[in-house]
Amino acid sequence: MSDNFINLKYIEDILHEAKNAGDAAVSRILDKAENGESLNHNEIAALLVNENGGHLNRIFDIAGKIKRRIYGSRIVMFAPLYVSDHCVNRCAYCSFNRAHDFNRRKLTMDEVREEVKVLEKMGHKRLALEAGESETECPIEYILDCIKTIYDMKFENGEIRRVNVNIAATTTENYRKLKAAGIGTYILFQETYHEPTYSRVHLAGPKKDFAWHLNAFDRAQDAGIDDVGGGVLFGLADPYFEVMGLLIHNEHLEAKYKTGFHTISVPRLCPAEGMSINDFPNPVDDATFAKIVAIIRIAVPFTGMILSTRENHEMRKKLLRLGISQISAGSSTETGGYAKRERNEKANPQFMVNDDRSALSIISELIDDGYIPSFCTACYRGGRTGDRFMSLAKSAEIGNVCLPNALMTLCEYSMDYGDAAFREKTAAIIEKEIPNIANEAVRQKTIENVKKIRTGNERDFFV
Ligand code: SAM
Ligand code: SF4
């Protein structure tokens, strides 16, 4: 049964009303946020519509503190893998939409292996599998084959250890099959929670059905997938409305399934073939975007936040400080794009990426900036998903789990994919961070494992 928990008038009224919150009220809301108290809808809305520079600086400051307290310096790394660009939908913003005429393709299993080889050479351990929607060209069995092909591949330096999946909303039965295939997070962007805008930009195909799309995570949860990742495509409707929609969706899932979003993605609309960016009247400027990321971090401190290479280097750097905990690196948004890049062929992406640096240079710079790029996939492999992951995230134990895992996987990455200079700077950051592991036994074990990774062929240690 479909469930429309997004009440357009309720959100519009709250945002309207929030404009009346005076400086004293906003200061009190920020005091609450600073004390770690959770904020209600009216309070979040007041922060969103606020334009006072002083308050904004405090929002950034609080978000940064929450980010450092919960996530430390860790940044989880991943890459997208596009397997098919056949699509029956007409999403006005996407170059894969069925009205756009181009040479479509779907990878054969050999081609999937080619792509994964290139991704593995970059050191990736975690992928997000992406596809357009087509029951005939890209049925669920094809997606399952891709997942199996990826998990079956073993390399000298390891393997892809977690496949997250970003495919169109589907049936409970298909979600059961995805669960059985061992996926990590099931990711689906609502695109927009504003139903009139949703209808305007989804012109044809199954995705046109707002309720079908909105209830996809309920079906996924009913099928046993307890790690789900939401998101909106910023640039379609009023961004403040979208943030309220995201939070209400999260609360709906928490109330019904005891776990909300594992992650929230914050893609911003990019130019793409087959669409004109000028047709979208709600662009989100950099300053508003930074404010939104910080407010999401404050509103849902324990939900991971994902940023893609849609954002440029400078913006990524800024947003990492405000709340982002996962980023992609070395990405291609084209079906077969990684192998094509190896052959120096011209790219034909789903949308233009704005950070086209290599994975190694992104990772290297993260270290220079004091971050710990993490290739950890431990929680999902140890069955710590859904509410079990959330209890870990909310406890002080997170530092005794995520930090050692980040350090051990980074050490592994440096040995297998880095040069001497890279290894040296990795060693320095590992040295600096190890004392921050509070649990004595875990700290000693981490020191031992790091030694084993450096001196032998042992890999894949995790807590
Ligand atoms: N086809 C599936 C779907 O639509 O849910 C998932 C895969 S689709 C390749 C992944 C996401 O790309 C979409 O959810 C959409 O938000 C995003 N996207 C499409 N066109 C975009 C554009 N021009 N700029 C930025 N993101 C875009
Ligand atoms: Fe197809 Fe997804 Fe692109 Fe829409 S966003 S046209 S469903 S690939």
Image (spheres, helix red, strand yellow):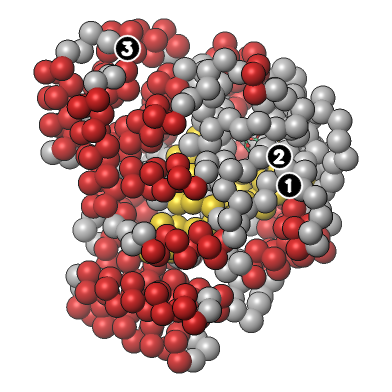
Q: Residue 350: which numbered mark, if any?
A: 2
Question: How would you rate the neighbour count of disc 3 (Cα within 10 Å): few for under 14, some for 14-19, many for 20 or more?
Answer: some
**In the image, what residue occupies the spot 46% across and 26% down?**
285
Mark pair 1, 2: CA separation = 6 Å
In x, y percent, where is residue 370?
Answer: 33, 62
Reading the image, the residue beneath label 3 is 14
What amino acid type should be assigned to the residue bearing mark 2? Gln
**In the image, what residue occupies the spot 72% across and 25% down?**
275
**In the image, what residue occupies the spot 51% across and 28% down?**
234
Reading the image, the residue beneath label 1 is 334
In x, y percent, where is residue 412?
Answer: 48, 77
Per the image, label 2 sits on a secondary structure element best described as loop
Closest to the observer, 422 or 405: 422
Residue 69 visible in the shown view: yes
N-terminal of the pair, mark 3 or mark 1, is 3
Left or right: residue 350 versus residue 32 is: right
User: Dividing the image into 4 quarters, which one contains the N terminus?
Assistant: top right
Q: Respond yes or no on whether mark 3 lies under 8 Å from ligand 1.
A: no
Between circles 3 and 1, the one closer to the viewer is: 1
